[in-house]
Image (cartoon, coloured by chain):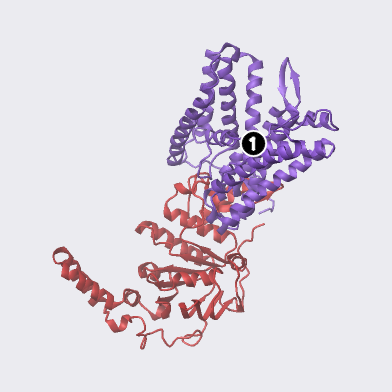
Amino acid sequence: MSQTLEAPAAPPRDERIVQKSLLARLLTRPEIGALVAAIAIYIFFFIVAEPFRTPAALSTVLYASSVIGIPATAVALLMIGGEFDLSAGVAVTSGALVASLTSYQLHLNVWVGVLISLVVLLAIGFINGWLLIKTGLPSFLVTLGTFFMLTGLNLAVTKMVSGGVATSNISDMDGFNAASAVFASDFNVGGVSIRITMLWWFLFVAASTWVLLRTHLGNWIFAVGGADASARAVGVPVARVKIGLFMFVSFAAWFTGMHILFQFNTVQSGEGVGNEFLYIIAAVVGGCLLTGGYGSAIGAAIGAFIFGMTTQGIVYAGWNPDWFKFFLGAMLLLATVLNTFIRRRAETKK
Amino acid sequence: MTATPDTTARTDGAPLVKLTEAGKSYGNIIALTGVNLEVSRAEVTCVLGDNGAGKSTLIKIIAGLHKHTEGTYEVEGEQVQFNSPREALNRGIATVYQDLAVVPLMPVWRNFFLGNEVRRGLSMDIAAMRRMAKQELLDMGIDLRDVEQPIGTLSGGERQCVAIARAVHFGAKVLILDEPTAALGVRQSGVVLRYIIQARERGLGVVFITHNPHHAYPVGDRFLLLKRGRSIGYFRKNEVTREDLTAMMAGGAELEELSHELERGGGAAAEAAHVLEEEVKELGITAETAGGGDAMAGQPGEQYTPGERYQQS
């Protein structure tokens, strides 16, 4: 209906709807559980760890959050679309390795390597999605398969090409400085160091939120995750949406991989294993349902922020960092219980 | 862009949907054979039949999910062979399935426009969609408190009506309703029947599939009775009474058998058997009029072929 419609006068309020308070409306959002938890954790570390209170510490926390947060945003969208990607963690490393190895071994400008890496990762995402659609297997199995394949490829190909477990330093190659400025620079604002990944993270979250809530694509993502047979029946191209989501996850993985490459100049081929769970945890803590059809990108951002706070907070508090994983697991359980509780309330309250 | 219902009525009088001696077999299994059916503008054609009578096969043929293997299928006078539901939809034939094709966790308005979103540039025109969904539902007589609530929170009848309103809004000329009242209580069923009448008054042709003659008779203009993949009768409303329909649907022989079965149980069951027997007598059902399986000789609808028994009015 694109004919011009007059701007509607303020629609008369339905007398059956009690104007909900801000709090009541807030309680129906998927990310509310994560927000409450994030505030509680922030206050907790603020009290127990004195160094945590400085702006510099907040910057460090945000940086750690952003490196998890960028892929977690894409993973959240994929989970809303009803699928998992267990290969996302090692795909980050694959992306960094491809860019590094191609540009170093072939003596190319690093930007060429960066682009080749993008193409390779998008292909991995496409293959994940295509296999899922063609085989009809659950994404858990399909991406578990690609996870192991990529893990093996990362190690084997790196050893075969460079003879070691890590890639060579590419910091003196053509284009390194420009690429580094895009993917891994930092600047000062009022004495606080801002890492560029924080800005990119913000952009990923903002764009994803806009797509989810304001575009037809967002509508389709919710629909394929919530009830894919229904979505298909009303003409939503389910296969294309799912493949697109897998490719978006690989795009985010590529982006994170580029950050790691230009931050550290070399890449360890065995890295990234296990990170896929951090992305999934961030998304789930942020309110994404494991069954799909529900969740938010902002929630995943809060989930990643909780992750950043806990990793750094434990260090600032002077505790043994071994405790981190314990906290992570406990947080996951608590947050999901809280989310389930809140969602039930939201659904029964009409 | 969404198609709005075509208001320029075709004047050539061809029915919106017409099946002539249509049938479908899956390999050596004959699911449906020799079925005649017509749906015209502003008419409700009811398809009645017990489980396994071939109702779903019939729907699937009309909806474009399956191709018929015998007879002809015409849409507005033109022979068709649909390859997909989308093609049927493009000809204005919309099917509302039992599962309704809605996404429970999504708000009503998002469900309403799913797959047909109103776009404005890159994004959606959310305000307009909310307003149109609310208005369209209001036109169907459904006054929702809030189109923002997840559709899963609506009652079964309301959900059914949203699905019907959606099909109407997106240009359906023929609505196929697959057992819309099967899972509903009495009051909710009444609500849905009202929307069927609403749709008819808006000039739509409706194919209403049900196994309940009490739901079919009040709203129907024509009745097709199916049994074991065959037509056991096809009537206009003035040719048949509700009792006839009930009798044919129930199948006198089976009712009698049921009554005997209950009688053997004794006690309360025997009492129930008695009531059933009374009912059978009241309806005047005999095994002969009810027609078991192939015993169709003497059936009112047996000799009927479209255009022969009654002329198009």
Query: In this rendering, would A87 be left or right of A291?
Result: right
Instruction: Tell me: residue A234, above or below residue B90.
Output: above
Pinpoint residue B218: horizontal percent, then vertical percent: 39, 69
Residue corresponding to mark 1: A71
Pinpoint residue B222: horizontal percent, then vertical percent: 45, 76
Query: In this rendering, would B43 be left or right of B184?
Result: right
Callout 1: chain: A
Secondary-structure class at tag 1: helix
Q: Which chain is purple?
A: A
Q: Give the residue furthest to the left.
A: B267
- The color chain B is rendered in: red
Query: In this rendering, would A199 be left or right of B258?
Result: right
Position of the C terminus of chain A by quadrant: top left
Look at the image and tell me whether residue B124 can be seen. no
Pinpoint residue B205: horizontal percent, then vertical percent: 52, 70
Pinpoint residue A281: horizontal percent, then vertical percent: 54, 34
Along the line of sight, which residue is nearer the eye, B201 or A50? A50
Residue name at image x 53 percent, y 39 percent: A288
> What's the amino acid at mark 1?
Pro
Residue name at image x 47 percent, y 41 percent: A15
